[in-house]
Image: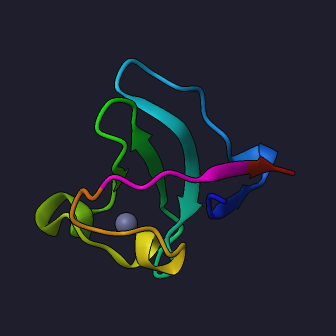
C-alpha cells in the first residue's frame, strides 16, 4: 500500500507539463507560500523554497515525510 498525503482542496494547484499533484504550503517563518509537487516522469518531489532549490532538501518535504534529494516516491493523494 502506498503512503498517503492529505491535501486540502483549497491548497491544490493544477498540474503542468512537468509537475503533478501540485499544492501550496505556507512558510513557517513568513507569510510566503511555496509549491510542492511531484515530477511527472522522475516521480521525485520538489519544493519551491530556497532550501530545496539550493540543496534538494528542505523541511517542508521532511515534514510531509517525503524523501529529499530527488528520490522517486509514490503516494496516494487524498483530497479533502
Ligand atoms: Zn521547502
76 in magenta: yes
Q: Residue at x 78, y 53 (%)?
A: 8
22 in magenta: no
- For the view shown, which residue lies furthest in the top direction? 17
Percent across and percent down for residue 11 are 69, 48
Quadrant in which the N terminus is drawn: bottom right
Q: Residue at x 58, y 53 (%)?
A: 75
- For the view shown, which residue lies furthest in the front direction? 1
Q: Quadrant of ligand 1?
A: bottom left
Location of residue 1 with respect to 16 vertically, above or below: below
Direction from residue 64 to residue 46 in the image, left or right: left
Percent across and percent down for residue 22 are 53, 40
Percent across and percent down for residue 39 are 36, 38
* Colour mapping used in the image: rainbow
Camera-nearest residue between 24 and 44: 44
Camera-nearest residue between 72 and 56: 72
Q: Residue at x 67, y 41 (%)?
A: 12
Question: What range of the chain is rendered magenta?
Answer: 72-77
Direction from residue 28 to residue 47 in the image, left or right: left
- For the view shown, which residue lies furthest in the right direction? 80
Direction from residue 39 to residue 52 in the image, left or right: left
Percent across and percent down for residue 15 are 53, 26
So how many labels did they put on this image? Answer: 0
- Secondary structure mostly seen in magenta is loop
Q: Residue at x 37, y 42 (%)?
A: 43
Amino acid at each position: 500500500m502506498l503512503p498517503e498525503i492529505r491535501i486540502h482542496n483549497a491548497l491544490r494547484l493544477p498540474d503542468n507539463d512537468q509537475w503533478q499533484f501540485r499544492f501550496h504550503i505556507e512558510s513557517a517563518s513568513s507569510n510566503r507560500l511555496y509549491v510542492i509537487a511531484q515530477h511527472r516522469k522522475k516521480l521525485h518531489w520538489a519544493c519551491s523554497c530556497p532550501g530545496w532549490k539550493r540543496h534538494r532538501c528542505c523541511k517542508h518535504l521532511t515534514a510531509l515525510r517525503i524523501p529529499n534529494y530527488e528520490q522517486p516516491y509514490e503516494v496516494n493523494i487524498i483530497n479533502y
